Amino acid sequence: MKLCSACLLGLECRYDGKSNLEKASDKLLQEFREGGIIPVCPEQLGGLPTPRIASEIQGMSGEHVLEGKCKVLGKDGEDVTPQFVKGAYEVLKIAQSLGVTEYIGVQKSPSCGCGKTYDGTFTRNLMDGDGVTVALLKRNGIFVKLL
């Protein structure tokens, strides 16, 4: 059993109300249809609406957010760190309760970002690092795969 960023499976849960279905492979979608993948949206699980204001980790990584060293801010300046952290822990609860050992994510997202996220300047500059959910899952021994 695997978890996957819900937007990759066609659910319109991205910040802009769209999906990332175009990034999904036929194999991934087939596995989803067969029940081997559970879609999750950490931002929705953390209580954020869809659509929502774009958010970025401020100059660091999701690991630093979990350590309290930086925040996740919306483009409007609102601190949405609590919602991102809550969503990450909700995904972890789902993973642990179902015995999930793998998560499939994407780059750039402040929650599901795997390997690269935006740098917090809202200028589309990327930096190395994981989103908040990916960082928490890795901390807890869940293998994270970039789609």
Image (tube, rainbow, N blue to C red):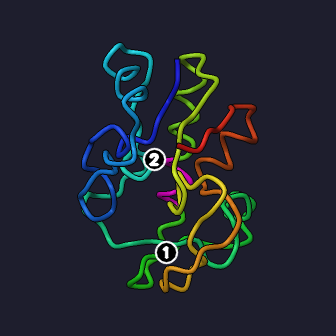
Separation of residues labelled 1 and 2 (CA atoms) = 16 Å
Pointer 2: what residue? 42
Which residue shows up at 49% across the image and 47% down it? 87
Residue 86 counted in the magenta span: yes
Of residues 80 and 127, the one nearer the viewer is 127
Which stretch did the figure color magenta? 82-87
Q: Give the SS element for disc 1.
A: loop
User: Percent from the top left, x then y, of residue 146?
Assistant: 59, 44
User: Percent from the top left, x then y, of residue 107?
Assistant: 54, 57
User: Percent from the top left, x then y, of residue 25?
Assistant: 40, 36
Can you say whether 56 is above or below 49 in the image?
below
Residue 143 counted in the magenta span: no
- Please report contact status of discs 1 and 2: CB closer than 8 Å, yes or no: no
Pointer 1: what residue? 79
**Which three-letter amino acid code belongs to the residue tagged 1?**
Asp
4 on left or right of 138? left
- Counting the numbered discs, the total is 2
**Which three-letter amino acid code belongs to the residue tagged 2?**
Pro
- The secondary structure that dominates the magenta segment is helix
Which residue shows up at 76% across the image and 41% down it? 139
Crowd class of label 2 (few under 14; some 14 to 19; many from 20; radius 10 Å):
many
10 on left or right of 56? left
